[in-house]
Amino acid sequence: MSEATSEAMNESGEATVTPTRNVIEARGLCKRYGRTLAVDHVDLVIPTGRIVGLIGPNGAGKTSVLKAVLGLSGYEGDLKVLGRDPSSQRASLMEDVCFIADVAVLPRWIRVRELIEVTEKVHPRFSREKCLHYLSTTKVRQDHKVKQLSKGMVVQLHLAIVMAIDARLLVLDEPTLGLDILYRKQFYTNLLNDYFDEERTIVITTHQVEEVEHILSDLIFIQDGKIALDCSMEEVQERYVELMVRADRADEARALKPLFERVLMGRHIFLFKNADRERLKPLGELHTPSVADLFVATMSAGEAESFELNTGAAA
């Protein structure tokens, strides 16, 4: 599998191609829709061999970032994907990129063999042999029409197509929307076991963060077009801790300036960043926050900061 490349000039002034280990590099990335700044000066680096969760509320800028990465829309700033400019080198870029949005949506009228033929024609790195090998382990037949398949079989078909494409970057935008929990779990399990390796990178956007948490290597939160959090899952465990206390010890916990507080069944749960855990231990139970809880806390903190800035400006 070839490495991502970028062009440079040697001492003779000739263009040379050098490998880069970063799949995505963005500096000052912006996207405007009229007067609305959907992506606000985003700096982003995603190395090779990572599984990255790009998480944000509706309208946060996730789709705009993905469209820029995939060369589907214009942008301001500097952006390189696999060493290429997605706006001017999209044709060559898409030879190394696979994009999947909602696996439950395929043309219902198309037969499986026709879908394979179309994919073979449009994607130079698609392997019919690999696809048929994956399908041989399922009940999906080539003469089936998509409308004849159960949702689980559609997942298997889509996975067979995806895993037969030798792509360096796989972008999944809400890939399991509309599927029940059994098939969602199957999708991610197969993706991890049969597709991912250290030379491939996967970027996932989803609202079902609890279902991808166990496979992520990195986490990016986006809010109001800005990066609110960008760290590895190891860094999440090192930086953040939740403290659960009884109501009578809540004031002691608040005095230590947590990032966020919530109440669950009479217990107060506080989120801390870079806190002295030995100081927190006597107050209650410590544990690592889930991605969902960290997301809610980060978004709430961002909204509070935005409110303070707006009210301060109005004053």
Image (cartoon, rainbow, N blue to C red):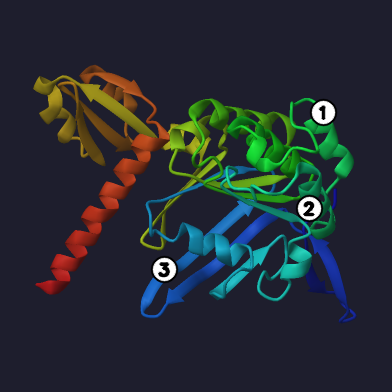
The mark that comes first in sequence, 2 or 1, is: 2
Image vertical order of residue 189 relative to residue 294, above or below? above
In percent of width and height, residue 47 lies at 65, 50
Residue that mark 2 sits on: 119
Q: Residue at x 36, y 38 (%)?
A: 294
Element marked by disc 3: strand
Element marked by disc 1: loop
**Can the viewer see residue 194 in this picture?**
yes
Q: Amino acid at mark 2?
A: Thr
Q: Is residue 118 left or right of residue 241?
A: right
Mark 2 neighbour density, 10 Å: few (under 14) some (14–19) many (20 or more):
some
Residue that mark 3 sits on: 38
Looking at the image, is mark 3 or mark 2 nearer the viewer? 2
Instruction: Name the mark on residue 136.
Output: 1
In percent of width and height, residue 230 lies at 47, 49
Image vertical order of residue 304 relative to residue 111, above or below? below
Indicate the quadrant where residue 148 lies. top right
Q: Is residue 20 left or right of residue 228?
A: right
In percent of width and height, residue 79 lies at 61, 68
The mark that comes first in sequence, 1 or 3, is: 3
Indicate the quadrant where residue 191 lies. top right
Q: Amino acid at mark 1?
A: Ser
Q: Amino acid at mark 3?
A: Ala
